[in-house]
Structures are given as structure tokens and as C-alpha cells.
Amino acid sequence: MDSFKILKTQDGSATLFSKIFGESYHNINGAVAEAVHIYANAAYKTKATSINILEFGYGTGLNAMITYKLLKNENKYINYTGVDIQPLSSKLLIEIGYKKLLGLSTKEYNSFTESWNETLTITDNFLLTKIRCDILNFDTSNRFDLVFYDAFSHDIQPELWTKDLFDRVFSMLNDGARLFTYSSKGLVKRNLRDAGFFVKRLAGPPGKRHIIEAQKVL
Ligand SMILES: C[S@@+](CC[C@H](N)C(=O)[O-])C[C@H]1O[C@@H](n2cnc3c(N)ncnc32)[C@H](O)[C@@H]1O
């Protein structure tokens, strides 16, 4: 707990500040606004009815919970895999307050915050697997349609934004798959392009001019 501070963001939702990394988990201009704008909307707008999602930097689970909320009553089948090296304590997660804010049942909320390294059926159309693992060592035989790339920034963790890692991510994707990230750093764009992605800048959420969409187009 001492390693974290809970901060209130501009849209009223809370986020965490990591004292170890010196960075917050979400945009200080709105944690929920960011999760909706960059990540959940990408899933919502994806036309396919079956979508395999990979999140790098699962953290509080906010992106996953919001994606679930937005798609729960849609005719889509979601298989969501979140990867993080450091699952957060239940106590800290309760204090952040997303259960109440998002109106999740205890069963739903527990699925997003507990039981790592197993696949949980939250509803018949939403499966969730949270994997405790270093992104650098993550390997899978699954192929994904969407990637939510939500690691700490390049300034803090440059090793998580390299061409080599993007090469590996590229190989985990179905043709046409798209990666979304809050980062719009030139070097990140370049490394994504060098790994074979077609990179576009999109308008960002409040307080952020641009975000990146990178597509695997063969
Ligand atoms: C910006 S936060 C993610 C915020 C998260 N998406 C959310 O909605 O709460 C970055 C996350 O990356 C995780 N992380 C840092 N280094 C990592 C690594 N090498 N492998 C896996 N996860 C890592 C941190 O533990 C943290 O949860």
C-alpha cells in the first residue's frame, strides 16, 4: 500500500499513482474517460462478433471492467487476456472504488480482481484470463484481434516499447488486428512501424491530443 497513492482524476474516478515507477495508472484528466475512449470503444466498434483481446498492463482491471460493461449486452463474444507482473491487493482495489462506481456485482468484481492464471467465465459471452507474468516473457498460442497496450510510459520503461517486443506482439495477432495505446511518442510510432504495423494517430481523450492505433495489415 505504501508503494501507491490513490488519486482522484478530473472525471471523478480514481486512479493509482505508483511511487515505485513515479507514474499514474491512468490519465489524470479522467481514468474512466481514458478507458472508454481509447480501449473499450475500440472493442465496441469492432465489427467481428468474436473478439480476442490482449491487455498488456492489466493493473486495476479498469479497462477490462469498462469493456465488459460496454459490451455485456451486445451480441459479441469476448475472450479477454490481461497480463501484469504485479497483481494489486484486494484491499487497495476496494479502496479505489471501481466496484461501486461501475455498479458491478460482487461475483463480477471478484472475477476482475482475483483468481489469476485461470480462465473465468463472467458471462456466457465474456471470458477473462489474468496472467501474472513479465510482458517480456509472455508467450501464447492464442491469436488476438485487439491489443490494449497500457504499460507505463516509454520514459519509465523503454524496454516495453521496443521494436523487438512489437515484433513478438505482431506475431500474436490475427490479420487485420489492431493495437491501441495512449502513447503517441514518435519513437513508439517508429518502432511499431518497423515491426510491420500500419500506424495512425487518433484524437485522444480529454487532456491528450493524440493516441495511437496500429494495425496488422499483411
Ligand atoms: C499504466 S499501468 C496499467 C493500468 C491498467 N491498464 C489499469 O486499467 O489499471 C501499467 C501496468 O503495467 C504493469 N507492469 C509494469 N512492468 C511490467 C512488466 N514488465 N510486465 C508486466 N506488467 C508490467 C504494472 O504492474 C502496471 O499494472
Image (cartoon, rainbow, N blue to C red):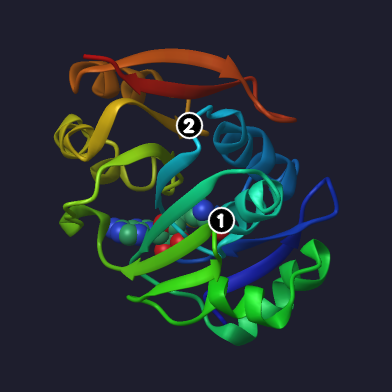
Considering only vertical position in the picture, is 204 above or below 15? above
Q: Looking at the picture, how far across and down is residue 6, in whole percent?
A: 69, 68
Q: Is residue 145 visible?
A: yes
Image quadrant holding the N terminus, namely bottom right
Query: How far apart in space, not on screen, are marks 2 and 1 (Cα)?
Result: 18 Å
Q: Nearer the viewer, residue 204 or 80?
A: 80
Q: State whether label 1 is within 8 Å of ligand 1.
A: yes
Q: Secondary structure at mark 2?
A: loop
Q: Looking at the picture, how far across and down is residue 202, in whole percent?
A: 57, 17
Q: Quadrant of ligand 1?
A: bottom left
Q: In this image, 107 relative to 76: left or right? A: right
Residue 145 sits in which quadrant?
top left
Q: Residues within 10 Å of mark 2 (few under 14, many from 20)?
A: few
Considering only vertical position in the picture, is 37 above or below 156? above
Q: Which mark is residue 48?
A: 2
Q: Nearer the viewer, residue 214 or 142?
A: 142
Q: Secondary structure at mark 1?
A: helix
Q: Which mark is first along the chain, 1 or 2? A: 2
Q: In this image, 147 relative to 160: left or right? A: right
Amino acid type at mark 2: Ala
Q: Looking at the picture, how far across and down is residue 34, in whole percent?
A: 66, 40
Considering only vertical position in the picture, is 114 above or below 49? below
User: In the rendered image, which residue does mark 1 sit on?
Assistant: 64
Residue 159 sits in which quadrant?
top left
Q: Looking at the picture, how far across and down is residue 107, in whole percent?
A: 65, 81
Q: State whether label 2 is within 8 Å of ligand 1.
A: no
Amino acid type at mark 1: Ala
Residue 102 sits in which quadrant?
bottom right
Q: Residues within 10 Å of mark 1 (few under 14, many from 20)?
A: many
Q: Nearer the viewer, residue 151 or 2?
A: 151
Q: In this image, 84 relative to 90: left or right? A: left
